[in-house]
Image (cartoon, rainbow, N blue to C red):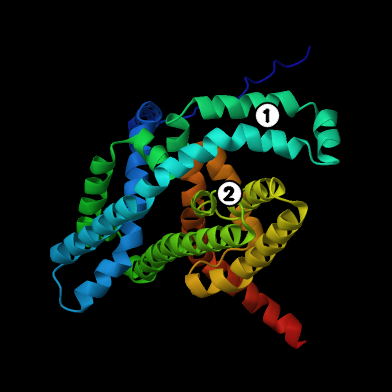
Amino acid sequence: MAEPRPPAPRVEIAVSVRTVLGLVGLGILVLIAALSIETLLSILVAAVVALGLDPIVAGLVRRGWGRGIAVVAVFAGLFAGVVALVVLAVGPVWEEIEEFLRALPGYWDELSQKPGFQDIVDAAGADDTIRNALRDLAAGLPEAASAVAGIAAGAFGSLLNVVTLAFLALFLLMERPTITDWLFGFTPPAAETRWRPVVENAILAVSSSLVGNVAISILAGTIAGVSSWLLGLPFPIVLGVITGLLDLIPQVGATVAAVILTFVALTVGTTEAIITVIIQLVYQQLENYVVAPIVYRRAVELSGLTTILSVLVAGSLLGVVGAILAVPFAAIIKIVLREASAPRRERMEALRAPAAGG
C-alpha cells in the first residue's frame, strides 16, 4: 500500500500595511493626475518657462541683485517685449493674415491648373477635398486667422489663462532655489554633492533650448519673409510669421513650413518654386549644422534622431505644447541618465582596460 503523499507546502505572501497604503496612495495620485491633466500640463508649462528664465535671473543675482527684484525685472522685460511684438507686428499684419486665408481657395485653383500637378491630384482624389477644406477655412474667419497667427498662444490659452500661467511661472522662478534646497534636504550630503550640479546643468539645458529655439525661429521667419518678398510671392509677411511659428516645433516644423512656401511659390511660377525649395534646403542645412550648435552652445547634446522621436512622441501625447517642450525634456532625461549610468560605465571601462592592454 502506497504511503500517503505529504501535503503540498503552503506559500504565504505577506503584504505589510505600509505597502498597501503605498499602493493605495499611488493609485490616488494616478487618479488625481488623470482627472486634472490640464492643470498639470499648465504647471508643467509654467515650470519649463521658469527654468528657462532661471539662468538669466541667476546672472543678475551674481551681479548683486536680489532674487525677487531680478525675477520681477526679467518678467517685466518679457512682458514689454510681448506687448511690443503684438502692437508692432501682429496688429498691422492681422488684416493681411485674413486676406491670405481668404485667398487660399483661389491659390489652390490656380495651383491645380499647373501642368502635371492636376494629374497627381486627380490620381490621389484630393482635389475636391482640399478645395472644400480651404473654403471652410476661409469662411471660418476670424477664428481661422487666430489659429494660424497665434497657434502657440492658442495652445497655451486652451490649458489655462495666460495671466495665471505667467504668475505661476513667476512664483516658481522666485522659489526655485528654496524648492531645490528643500528637496535636497531629504538626501545624504554625498547625494547632494553628486546631483546638485546635474540639476543646474539640466536647468541650463532647458534655458538654452527654449531661448535658442525662439532665436532660430525668428531667424527662419525673417529669411522666409525676405526671400518671399524678393521672389514676389503674395503676403510675404504672413509667410514669414507662419514659418517662424512652425519652426518652433524642432525638425518637423521647418519641413512643414518649407512645403507651404513651395506651394505658394508655385502659384507665382515654377522658377520661383524651385528657388524657394533651394533656399529652404540650404537654410535648413545651415540651421541644423551651423546655427543650432552656435545658439545652443552644446548645452543640449541631442542627435537628430533623438530630437525627431521626442517631438513625435510628445506631440502625439500633448499636442503642439508637447512638441515644443519635447527637446528641453529630452535634454533633461539625457543629462540624468548620463549621470545615473556613470558609475556602471566607469566599471565597464575598467574591465575593458586590461583586455585592451593585453
Q: Name the residue under label 2.
A: 234
Query: Picture coordinates of residue 280 (x, y %)?
Result: 66, 60
Q: Which mark is residue 130?
A: 1
Kind of residue sitting beneath label 1: Ile
Three-letter code for the amino acid on which mark 2 is drawn: Pro
Q: Nearer the viewer, residue 101 or 157?
A: 101
In percent of width and height, residue 108 lies at: 68, 35
Q: Position of residue 198 (x, y in %)?
A: 40, 67
Q: In front: mark 1 or mark 2?
A: 2
Residue 171 relative to residue 348: left or right: left
Are there few (<14), some (14-19), or many (20+) residues within 10 Å of tag 2?
Answer: some
Seen at 13% across and 69% down, the residue is 66
Q: Is mark 1 on a helix, strand or loop?
A: helix
Query: Depth check: 271 or 315 in front?
Result: 271
Q: Which residue is drawn at 48% across and 26% down?
A: 140
Quadrant in the rendering for residue 205 = bottom left
Q: Where is residue 95 in the image (x, y as percent from the top left)?
A: 42, 41
Dot 2 lies on which element? loop
The vertical placement of 323 against 58, above or below, is above
Name which of mark 1 and mark 2 comes first in the sequence: 1
Give the answer, above or below, for where 9 lies relative to 169.
above
Determine contact: label 1, label 2, CB under 8 Å. Answer: no
| Badge number at residue 226 | none
Name the residue located 62 percent from the left edge and 50 percent from the top edge: 309
Could you tell me if residue 198 is visible in this image? yes
Spatial separation of the CA atoms under disc 1 and disc 2: 20 Å
